[in-house]
Image (spheres, helix red, strand yellow):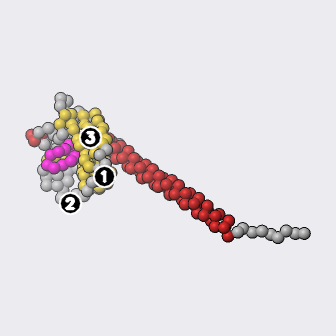
């Protein structure tokens, strides 16, 4: 005698579907949380990489200051380094690696500026400019609230350079520099560098 084949009852099938739905909802929630954490870590990693790059560029720039004043587009004298004067954030002349122009180290004019919450670095390949001279611009960091600067002249720290208006045409450089980046989320980053002056 053979026994009749027995299948699932409707009640057993409904219970199995309900258990599967609960487990699926829990698994999806866990997967969504893992994906959200992964996206957050990727964004944080990208911000840290951008910050490391920006600080490295700033340290290289400020470590290669050159005592060479320039003429602006209107023919006015500018000091080798100017910060906090005439509304400038930071503008200076820097040496460029091993490049050589006519037996002299190659020099570039660099400017840092804040615009719309971002820190920009502008570079002129020509030191003594004309009204037609262009520059290259690079956004280094987003969400920057402020770039604060201080310069050490050997005796005291000052938030601007040159120390007074009589030195506007001078090529003197500070003995030390400090920059502090303040971010929109209230974080700060501070670096102190030895200057060439």
Q: Which residue is mark 3?
A: 179
Between residues 193 and 167, which one lies in front from this camera angle?
Answer: 193
User: What residue sits right under mark 1 in the picture?
Assistant: 143
**What segment is highlighted magenta in the picture?**
80-93
Provide the secondary structure element on which disc 1 rests: loop
The mark that comes first in sequence, 3 or 1, is 1
User: Split into 4 quadrants, where in the image is the N terminus?
Assistant: bottom right
Magenta residue check for 17:
no
Image coordinates of residue 122 in percent, x first then y, are: 27, 52
> As displayed, is residue 154 above or below residue 11?
above
Asked whether disc 1 touches disc 2, contact meaning CB atoms under 8 Å apart, the reply is: no
Looking at the image, residue 127 lies above or below residue 172: below
- Mark 2–mark 3 Cα distance, whole angstroms, equals 32 Å
In percent of the image, x 20 and y 42: which residue is there?
81
Q: Residues within 10 Å of mark 3 (few under 14, many from 20)?
A: some
Q: Earlier in the sequence, mark 2 or mark 3?
A: 2
Residue under the point 67% across and 70% down: 10
Q: Which residue is mark 2?
A: 132
Callout 2 secondary element: loop
How crowded is the residue under tag 1: few (<14 C-alpha within 10 Å), some, or many (20+)? few
Which of discs 1 and 2 lies nearer the camera? The answer is 1
* Distance from Cα at disc 1 to Cα at disc 2: 31 Å
What is the quadrant of residue 176 in the picture? top left
Q: Which mark is residue 191?
A: none
Between disc 2 and disc 3, the foreground one is 3
């Amino acid at each position: 005698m053979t026994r009749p084949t027995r299948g699932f009852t409707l009640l057993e099938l409904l219970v199995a579907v309900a258990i599967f739905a609960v487990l699926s909802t829990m698994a999806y929630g866990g997967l969504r949380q893992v994906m959200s954490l992964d996206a957050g870590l990727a964004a944080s990693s990208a911000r840290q990489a951008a910050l490391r790059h920006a600080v490295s560029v700033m340290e290289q720039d400020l470590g290669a200051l050159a005592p060479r004043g320039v003429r602006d587009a209107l023919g006015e004298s500018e000091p080798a380094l100017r910060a906090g004067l005439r509304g400038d954030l930071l503008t200076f002349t820097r040496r460029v690696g091993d490049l050589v122009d006519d037996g002299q180290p190659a020099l570039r004019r660099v400017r840092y500026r804040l615009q719309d919450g971002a820190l920009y670095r502008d570079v002129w390949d020509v030191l003594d400019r004309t009204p037609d001279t262009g520059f290259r611009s690079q956004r280094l960091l987003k969400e920057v609230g402020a770039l604060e600067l201080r310069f050490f002249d050997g005796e005291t720290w000052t938030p601007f350079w040159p120390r007074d208006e009589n030195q506007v045409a001078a090529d003197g450089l500070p003995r030390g520099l400090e920059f502090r980046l303040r971010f929109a989320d209230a974080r700060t980053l501070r670096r102190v560098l030895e200057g060439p002056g």
